[in-house]
């Protein structure tokens, strides 16, 4: 069985090399056809991912006091998603799904890569093809600024995963000022090189993001802006650094008023988004650039706001994975909102579609192209799945089945988005149907060994 699994799911480096030779030839042919028929340039793509931002943490999603004018403007003038979900209820799985277009279990990343313990030696296997690699092969400049969290070791660095440029950190969180991680290890990188750089992390991310845009504005580019905010430690711009090597520190930060710090962190992140949008405007790139904003999972605790949703980060209640998402592309996206069910893994096939690039035949994805919603169309109904630490969930239309702690829940999310009324007893046939569907999915993903839990 192990041999069969290896054949099915582990791509050798030779196979990957041949894959990129084939896709490069394919992209050249696509570009040749594009040049023969149109002069429209390839669109630029910017993904902005917040860390631990709750469903209700933005003004446009109902927060009563947080000031997020730039993201709210994106929502007003772009497309606001009301049924967008992170693939995972924690950091690493969602990021793996976004970059590979697959359920995270299919690339061995079901759980978190921790700063301590055996998972520190693991990472997203470079045999898996990423969105950055696919777009780079099509002529895009590719960059990531901010949080990676898909491998600490140098062999898992973003520069080996399709990114031309990386400035940021590889762990789950760092001190916003000293840039030491939760194990007291300095964690700020320029590609493969550790670099000393002063500054508040959110501001540094803004600085390097806007510089990347300016330096690459004359060619198509893909920029992944992975913010740390509002993940702890709870630190504002003018707070002292807390983490240093060989010293004791509070992982959450020394500032006593966590709530005020959290609000500042969200609002400074919103400022960062504004700077990116202003840079696009100044370079006259706005109408050729899709900016897609989302969160990697729900808010972690009571400091964050998951709106009416039940649960929080690490849980498979809606509050753990239904998160804010906004698509902004002036002149292309019809402003409004959509209730289409979309997941992180859908980003890869969507961007490839927008760039008029087919998904290579030997690269299977589980994500779907959601670009039709940009013009007001709907998406075909599908079944989606989540799993994390003894919790399983399956969604089919408005029905959601959740299994945790030996209890089976069934909810009609159209009528009960807050998941208050368990309908399992009333609809045993639907429960059995969804359990059977869930079991089939788990049998499929369980053929892949998981490096994280």
Image (cartoon, helix red, strand yellow):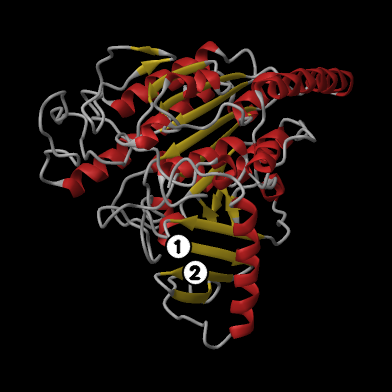
Which disc, if any, is residue 214? none
Q: Which residue is under mark 2?
A: 402
* Secondary structure of the residue carrying numbered label 2: strand
- CB-based contact (under 8 Å), mark 2 and mark 1: yes
- What residue lies at 22% left-to-right and 25% top-to-bottom? 177
The image shows residue 108 at horizontal and vertical percentages of 53, 41
Instruction: Answer yes or no: is residue 82 visible.
Output: no
Q: Which of 185 and 50 is in front in this view?
A: 185
Q: Nearer the viewer, residue 60 or 104?
A: 104
Q: Which residue is under mark 1?
A: 391
* Secondary structure of the residue carrying numbered label 1: strand
- Label 2 CA crowd tier, 10 Å (few <14, some 14–19, many 20+): many
Residue 412 placement: quadrant: bottom right
The image shows residue 398 at horizontal and vertical percentages of 60, 70
The image shows residue 51 at horizontal and vertical percentages of 38, 41
Above or below for 154 versus 347: above
Q: Distance between the residues labelled 2 and 1?
A: 7 Å
Above or below for 428 versus 257: below
Please report whichever mark, 2 or 1, sits nearer to the chain's N-terminal start: 1
Above or below for 31 versus 377: above
- What residue lies at 52% left-to-right and 82% top-to-bottom? 424
- Label 1 CA crowd tier, 10 Å (few <14, some 14–19, many 20+): some
Residue 390 placement: quadrant: bottom left
Instruction: Answer yes or no: is residue 246 visible.
Output: yes
Which label sits in the foreground, 2 or 1? 1
């Amino acid at each position: 069985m192990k041999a069969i699994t290896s054949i099915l799911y582990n791509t050798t480096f030779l196979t990957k090399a041949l894959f990129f030779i084939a896709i490069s030839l394919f992209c050249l042919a696509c570009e040749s056809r594009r040049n023969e028929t149109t002069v429209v340039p390839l669109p630029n793509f910017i993904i902005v991912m917040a860390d631990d931002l709750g469903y209700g943490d933005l003004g446009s999603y109902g927060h009563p006091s947080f000031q997020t004018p730039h993201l709210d403007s994106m929502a007003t003038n772009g497309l606001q998603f009301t049924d967008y979900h992170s693939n995972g209820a924690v950091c690493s799985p969602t990021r793996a799904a976004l970059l590979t277009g697959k359920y995270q279990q299919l690339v061995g990343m079901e759980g978190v890569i921790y700063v301590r313990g055996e998972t520190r030696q693991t990472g997203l296997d470079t045999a898996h093809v990423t969105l950055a690699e696919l777009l780079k092969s099509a002529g895009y400049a590719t960059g990531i600024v901010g949080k990676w969290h898909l491998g600490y070791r140098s062999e898992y660095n973003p520069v080996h995963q399709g990114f031309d440029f990386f400035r940021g950190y590889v762990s789950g969180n760092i001190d916003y000022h000293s840039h030491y991680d939760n194990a007291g290890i300095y964690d700020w990188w320029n590609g493969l090189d550790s670099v000393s750089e002063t500054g508040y992390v959110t501001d540094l991310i803004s600085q390097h993001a806007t510089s990347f845009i300016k330096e690459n504005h004359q060619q198509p580019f893909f920029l992944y802006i992975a913010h740390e905010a509002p993940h702890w430690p709870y630190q504002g711009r003018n707070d002292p650094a807390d983490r240093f090597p060989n010293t004791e520190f509070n992982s959450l930060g020394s500032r006593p008023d966590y709530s005020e710090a959290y609000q500042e962190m969200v609002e400074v992140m919103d400022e960062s988004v504004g700077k990116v949008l202003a840079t696009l405007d100044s370079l006259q790139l706005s109408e050729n650039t899709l900016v897609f904003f989302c969160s990697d999972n729900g808010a972690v605790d009571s400091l964050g706001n998951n709106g009416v949703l039940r649960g929080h980060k690490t849980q498979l209640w809606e509050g753990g994975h239904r998160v804010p998402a906004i698509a902004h592309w002036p002149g292309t996206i019809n402003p409004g909102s959509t209730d289409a069910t979309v997941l992180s893994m859908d980003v890869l096939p969507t961007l490839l579609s927008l760039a008029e690039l087919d998904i290579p035949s030997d690269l299977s994805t589980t994500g779907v192209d959601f670009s039709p919603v940009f013009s007001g169309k709907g998406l075909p109904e599908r079944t989606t799945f989540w799993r994390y630490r003894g919790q399983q969930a399956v969604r089919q239309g408005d029905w959601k089945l959740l299994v945790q702690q030996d209890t089976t829940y069934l909810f009609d999310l159209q009528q009960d988005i807050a998941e208050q009324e368990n309908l399992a007893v009333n609809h045993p046939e639907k429960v059995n149907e969804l359990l059977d569907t869930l079991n089939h999915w788990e049998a499929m993903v369980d053929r892949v060994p998981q490096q994280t839990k």
